Amino acid sequence: MNISQPTFHRLASSARRKIADSIVNGKALKIEGGTFRVIGKDRFR
């Protein structure tokens, strides 16, 4: 990913907090960005 370990850790921690908050409080979670493709009915890459 060409980023430092502290930057990666900060991004992962932020994502973890946002996901936990959305699950616990019933909030919508919008995931966007990056490149992906659908490889099956319920599988993404």
Image (cartoon, grey):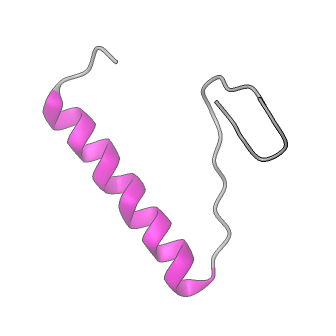
Q: Is residue 15 above or below residue 40?
A: below
Dividing the image into 4 quarters, which one contains the C terminus?
A: top right
Where residue 34 sits: x, y (%)? 60, 26
Q: Which residues are magenta?
A: 5-26
Left or right of 41 on screen, residue 23? left
Magenta-colored segment: predominant secondary structure? helix
Where residue 30 sits: x, y (%)? 67, 54
Q: Is residue 18 above or below residue 24?
A: above
Q: Residue at x 22, y 34 (%)?
A: 7
Q: Residue at x 55, y 73 (%)?
A: 22
Q: In the rendered picture of this protein, how many numbered marks are placed on residues?
A: 0
**Between 17 and 39, which is closer to the camera in this rendering?**
39
Left or right of 12 on screen, residue 19? right
Residue 10 shown in magenta? yes
Q: Residue at x 29, y 54 (%)?
A: 13
- Considering every residue shown, the one lying at the far right of the view is 41
Where residue 28 sits: x, y (%)? 68, 69
Left or right of 44 on screen, residue 22? left
Q: Is residue 13 above or below residue 25?
A: above
- Considering every residue shown, the one lying at the far bottom of the view is 25
**Between 42 and 16, which is closer to the camera in this rendering?**
42
Q: Residue at x 55, y 85 (%)?
A: 25
The answer to which image quadrant residue 32 occupies is top right
The answer to which image quadrant residue 20 occupies is bottom left
- Considering every residue shown, the one lying at the far front of the view is 40
Dividing the image into 4 quarters, which one contains the N terminus?
A: top left
